[in-house]
Image (cartoon, rainbow, N blue to C red):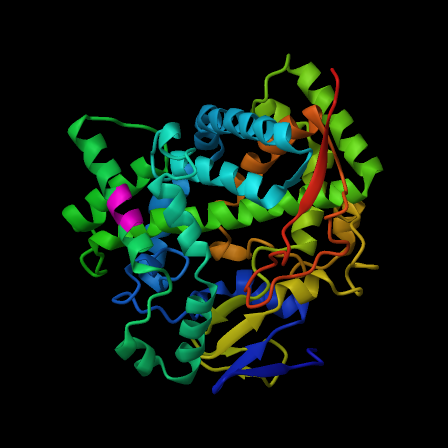
C-alpha cells in the first residue's frame, strides 16, 4: 500500500509528486504506456530548436527515437572512438598550455572546452579546428545558450502563469542569434555531405537519414515533421553533451581531489588496464574499469544532471491496490535529487562513497531510487556515449596528473542560484601536479 501521496503546485498547476520507489518504477517502466510524455510545454514557433526527442510527444517521439537509437549501439559507439580520441588529445594540449601559466585551474571551463569539441565533432560533424578556437562562432554560440538562465526562468514562469501570454510575447528559450547559428551550421553540414557523397557512421548521418525518411519521403504521413526538427535533435545532443558531461566530469575530479585514496585506487586500475591492452584506450580497456564505473555512478548520484524528472499521464491510470486514480493530463514530478540524497536508501548521503554501487550494495536497494539519466523507454539516449566520453578523457588525465584542492576550492560546493541542475556558484578550482612517468 502507498502510505504517502504528495502533491505540489507549480504556480497554478497541480502536480503529483512521486516518492514511493515501486510506484516510480511503474510510472517510468512497467506501466510506461500510460505516461509516455514528459509534460513539457514547448512553443515550437518561438523556439523551434526545442522540438526535439526529449520534449516531443507520443508517436512523434517514438518515431524519432527509433531513428536515433541505432547510432548509440555498442558497435556504433566503437566507431566514434577515433573521433573522441582526437578530442582528448586536444584536451590534454589545452590542459598543458594552461598549466604553464598556473597549476590552479577552473576545471568546468577546461571540461566544457572538451565536451564542446566532442559534441561539435560527433553531433555537428565539424572539423576540430572549427571548434577549438575560443573565438570561433561555434564556441560563442554555445556560451550564449548557457548564459541565458534568466531568459529560461522567465519563460518557465510564464508557462505556468499564462502559456498564452508567453506565446503572444514569443519568448524563446535561447538567444535567437545562437539558435540561428546552430540551425545554419547543421544544415550546412548536411548540404556538404550530400553534395560530396560523404557517409559516416555518426549522429549527423542518422539525422540525415531521418530527414530523408520523415520529411522528403514522408514515410509517416500521420506525423507532421518540419525541417527544423532535424536540427533540433542535433541541438539537443549539444545541450546534453555539453552541460551534463562537462559538469559530471568536473564534479568527479572534485570528489577525487577530496578523497586521495579513491583517486589513487582508480589510477592504479587505469594503469593496470592500460598495460593489459598495450596502451590502447579501446573498448576492451573501458570494460576493465569497473571501479571507475562505480565512481561515476556515485558522482551522478550526488550531482545528477536533472534534479526532477517530469511525466504526464497520457491515459487515466488506476494505481494497483489503491483507490488512487491518476487522471489523464495529470502532471507528475519525480524528485531524482531528493531520492538520491535520501538516507533511507543511501546512508550518510552527503559523503562520496563509490562502494554504494558495488553489485552487492545495488542489490539491497529498490529500483526507482537512482535515475541520473531518467529511466525506462525515455531514458537519455546518449547515456552510454556520455559515459564513454567521460571515462576515456578522465583516464588520460588521471594517469598524467594528480589533482588536489587549493585555496580557491569551495568545500563544500556552493550551488548556483536560478539553475535547474547542479552547477557550482564559483566554479571548481583544483590544483594539478604532473606525475613523473
Residue farthest toward the front in the current orientation of the protein: 101
The dominant secondary structure in magenta is helix
Position of 360 relative to 13 (above/below): above
| 46 displayed left or right of 107 | left
Q: Residue 179 in the image: x percent, y percent?
A: 31, 54
Residue 365 shows in this picture: yes
Residue shown at 51% from the left, 68% from the top: 310
| 414 displayed left or right of 81 | right
Residue shown at 60% from the left, 86% from the top: 323
Residue shown at 46% from the left, 35% from the top: 118
Residue 193 in which image quadrant: top left
The residue lying toward the viewer, choosing from 235 and 58, is 235
- Of the 4 image quadrants, the one containing the N terminus is bottom right
Q: Residue 346 in the image: x percent, y percent?
A: 78, 59
Residue 285 in which image quadrant: top right
Query: Does the segment drawn in magenta span residue 184?
Result: yes
The residue lying toward the viewer, choosing from 106 and 53, is 106
| 379 displayed left or right of 124 | right
Residue farthest toward the top in the current orientation of the protein: 278
Q: Residue 266 in the image: x percent, y percent?
A: 75, 32
Residue 381 shows in this picture: no
The tally of labels here is 0
Residue shown at 46% from the left, 55% from the top: 146
Query: Does the segment drawn in magenta span residue 139?
Result: no
Which range of residues does the magenta coloring cover?
181-186
Q: Residue 282 in the image: x percent, y percent?
A: 56, 22
- Of the 4 image quadrants, the one containing the C terminus is top right
Position of 427 relative to 190 (above/below): below
Position of 54 relative to 428 (above/below): below
Amino acid at each position: 500500500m502507498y502510505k504517502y501521496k504528495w502533491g505540489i503546485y507549480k504556480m497554478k498547476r497541480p502536480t503529483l509528486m512521486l516518492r514511493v520507489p515501486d510506484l516510480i518504477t511503474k510510472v517510468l517502466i512497467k506501466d510506461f504506456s500510460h505516461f509516455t510524455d514528459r509534460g513539457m510545454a514547448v512553443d515550437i514557433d518561438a523556439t523551434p530548436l526545442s522540438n526535439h526527442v526529449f520534449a516531443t510527444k507520443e508517436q512523434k517521439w517514438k518515431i524519432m527515437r527509433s531513428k536515433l537509437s541505432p547510432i548509440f549501439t555498442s558497435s556504433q559507439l566503437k566507431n566514434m572512438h577515433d573521433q573522441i580520441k582526437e578530442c582528448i588529445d586536444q584536451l590534454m594540449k589545452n590542459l598543458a598550455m594552461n598549466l604553464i601559466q598556473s597549476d590552479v585551474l577552473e576545471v568546468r571551463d577546461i571540461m566544457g572546452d572538451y565536451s564542446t569539441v566532442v559534441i561539435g565533432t560527433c553531433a555537428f560533424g565539424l572539423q576540430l579546428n572549427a571548434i577549438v578556437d575560443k573565438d570561433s562562432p561555434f564556441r560563442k554560440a554555445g556560451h550564449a545558450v548557457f548564459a541565458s538562465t534568466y531568459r529560461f526562468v522567465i519563460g518557465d514562469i510564464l508557462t505556468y502563469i499564462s502559456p498564452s501570454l508567453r506565446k503572444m510575447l514569443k519568448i524563446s528559450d535561447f538567444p535567437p542569434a545562437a539558435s540561428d547559428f546552430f540551425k545554419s551550421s547543421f544544415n550546412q553540414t548536411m548540404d556538404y555531405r550530400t553534395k560530396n557523397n560523404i557517409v559516416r557512421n555518426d549522429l549527423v548521418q542518422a539525422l540525415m537519414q531521418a530527414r530523408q525518411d520523415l520529411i522528403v519521403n514522408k514515410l509517416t504521413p500521420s506525423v507532421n515533421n518540419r525541417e527544423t526538427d532535424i536540427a533540433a535533435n542535433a541541438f539537443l545532443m549539444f545541450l546534453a553533451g555539453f552541460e551534463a558531461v562537462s559538469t559530471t566530469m568536473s564534479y568527479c575530479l572534485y570528489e577525487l581531489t577530496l578523497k586521495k585514496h579513491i583517486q589513487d585506487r582508480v589510477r592504479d586500475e587505469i594503469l593496470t588496464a592500460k598495460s593489459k591492452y598495450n596502451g590502447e584506450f579501446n573498448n576492451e580497456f573501458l570494460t576493465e574499469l569497473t571501479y571507475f564505473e562505480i565512481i561515476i555512478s556515485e558522482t551522478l548520484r550526488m550531482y545528477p544532471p536533472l534534479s526532477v524528472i517530469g511525466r504526464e499521464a497520457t491515459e487515466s491510470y488506476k494505481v494497483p491496490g489503491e483507490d488512487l486514480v491518476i487522471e489523464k493530463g495529470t502532471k507528475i514530478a519525480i524528485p531524482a535529487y531528493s531520492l538520491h540524497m535520501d538516507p533511507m536508501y543511501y546512508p550518510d548521503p552527503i559523503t562520496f562513497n563509490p562502494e554504494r554501487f558495488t553489485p552487492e550494495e545495488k542489490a539491497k536497494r529498490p529500483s526507482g531510487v537512482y535515475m541520473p539519466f531518467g529511466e525506462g523507454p525515455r531514458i537519455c539516449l546518449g547515456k552510454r556515449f556520455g559515459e564513454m566520453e567521460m571515462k576515456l578523457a578522465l583516464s588520460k588525465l588521471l594517469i598524467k596528473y594528480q589533482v588536489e584542492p587549493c585555496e580557491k576550492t569551495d568545500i563544500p560546493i556552493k550551488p548556483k542560484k536560478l539553475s535547474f541542475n547542479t552547477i557550482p556558484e564559483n566554479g571548481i578550482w583544483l590544483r594539478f601536479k604532473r606525475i613523473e612517468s
